[in-house]
Image (spheres, rainbow, N blue to C red):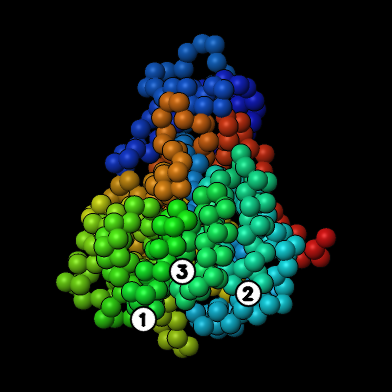
Amino acid sequence: MMDLALFLNHDAYMLADATLPAADGGLLRRNLVIAGGRIAAISEQPPGAGLPVAHLGGAMVWPAMADIHTHLDKGFIWDRTPNPDGTFMGALQAVNQDREAYWSVEDVRRRMTFALRCAHAHGTQAVRTHLDTMGAHGHTVWPLIREMQAQWAGRIALQAVSLAMPQSYAGEEGERIAREVAATPGACLGAVLMHDNATPEHLERLFALAEKFGCGLDLHVDENNVRGGTALQAVAEMVMRRRFSLPVLCGHCCSLSVQDAPRQKEIVQSVADAGMGIVSLPMCNLYLQDRQPGRTPLWRGVSMVHELHAAGVPVMFASDNTRDPFYAYGDLDMAEVFSQAVRIAHLDHPFGGWWQSVSVTPARWMGLDTTLRAGNPADLVIFEARDMNQLVTRPAAPRTVIRHGRVLDARVPAYTELEQPAP
């Protein structure tokens, strides 16, 4: 790709002959005028005189991306504490071991910063992280995330979720967690819910705290392949019974795909009726689910994203874990997430508007408007690709990130930075 920095070091300029993805999946050849850090106009008219022009030759221009489900406090510990066998239980044990041995405030801050630098360089402008809210770490991580929010303001809109088992919200400890969450801008209450712990008592307590402290919910739900019941149905029913008006996002929802067909249809409709959102984590779940020694995995661990989308449910995809025992790979790159989601969940033939599931839709859920329209901030990603097939085929190809109308001078950090001793 051309060195756009040579062309765009101006307060006003034109991006000529860009390919823009439309909400219906169409591709539009347009010219964008950028001025004062915003999109001043989007037009079919050819470039006029008076503005510097960068001719893109049909290169795709996306809005900046949003990663709505990550685990920044766990991230990038693989080199020191890998998953011994690639299983879910192996991941739990390895993370618990690493947390006890290494998770000082300095260690977590350094790894969070590394992760955010990756996301920023790849063109992401909003990140939501789940934070292990347990033990000593559960007390120190919330002041730290507020510090990180302030430090990254203007570069990445950072939100957080308390990750705990539902029983953790009982009594004064539950009140303490909820107060920490409520004191953190944009934060949500979260819990790990399965078919056997999403009891009415646990859900009543969680929803009551969310209502009392004015927090939305962002839940880990049914990250398994258990048949014969889901926590997702219980959550949807609780939303409707309490007429809960705050946002409720459910992540994973893997076991939905192994229920019988009538039950699947009923659950999908309940989620739609409750106004909930779903975030699928296809890379992590493909890595963890149905892993058994010496046997080929027989399912993908992906939720019913097509059926949920068809029912009107906002469906999103996200990074989840990155280079930690829950997922050995990943780099906080939403182009990679989109490319892998297309392959794993068959988001092609046609591609439709699925590109929004890693950009406009999660950004909107996080309170941001990133649609490509005149008046919005010029926070853009220019891909070398000219269509979706090229983008999915080469998600790691060169790209140019524009923030506030200027080319971003940022590179992903080297892994060797994490090998240095903490200051």
Q: Which residue is painted at 35% across and 62% down in the image?
A: 345
Element at label 3: loop
Q: Which is more toward the observer, 285 or 228?
A: 228
Q: Gap between marks 2 and 3, in whole Å?
A: 15 Å
Q: Nearer the viewer, mark 1 or mark 2?
A: 2
* Amino acid identity at mark 3: Ala
**6 left or right of 243 in image:** right
* Amino acid identity at mark 1: Asp
**68 left or right of 308 in image:** right
Point out the tag, 1 or 2, that comes first from the N-terminus: 2
Where's residue 236, x and y in %?
A: 29, 64
Q: Which residue is mark 1?
A: 196
In this rendering, does residue 273 appear at all? yes
In the displayed structure, 278 sits above or below 382; it is below
The answer to whether marks 1 and 2 mark residues whose Cβ atoms lie closer than 8 Å is no
- How many neighbours does mark 3 have within 10 angstroms: few (below 14), some (14-19), or many (20 or more)? many
* Amino acid identity at mark 2: Gly
Q: Which residue is mark 3?
A: 191
- Residue furthest toward the top? 49
Q: Which residue is painted at 51% across and 50% down in the image?
A: 186
Q: Which residue is mark 2?
A: 135
Q: Which residue is painted at 64% across and 66% down in the image?
A: 139
Q: Gap between marks 1 and 2, in whole Å?
A: 24 Å
The answer to whether marks 3 and 1 mark residues whose Cβ atoms lie closer than 8 Å is no
Where's residue 197, x and y in %?
A: 39, 78
Q: Gap between marks 3 and 1, in whole Å?
A: 13 Å
**172 left or right of 10 in image:** left
Element at label 2: helix
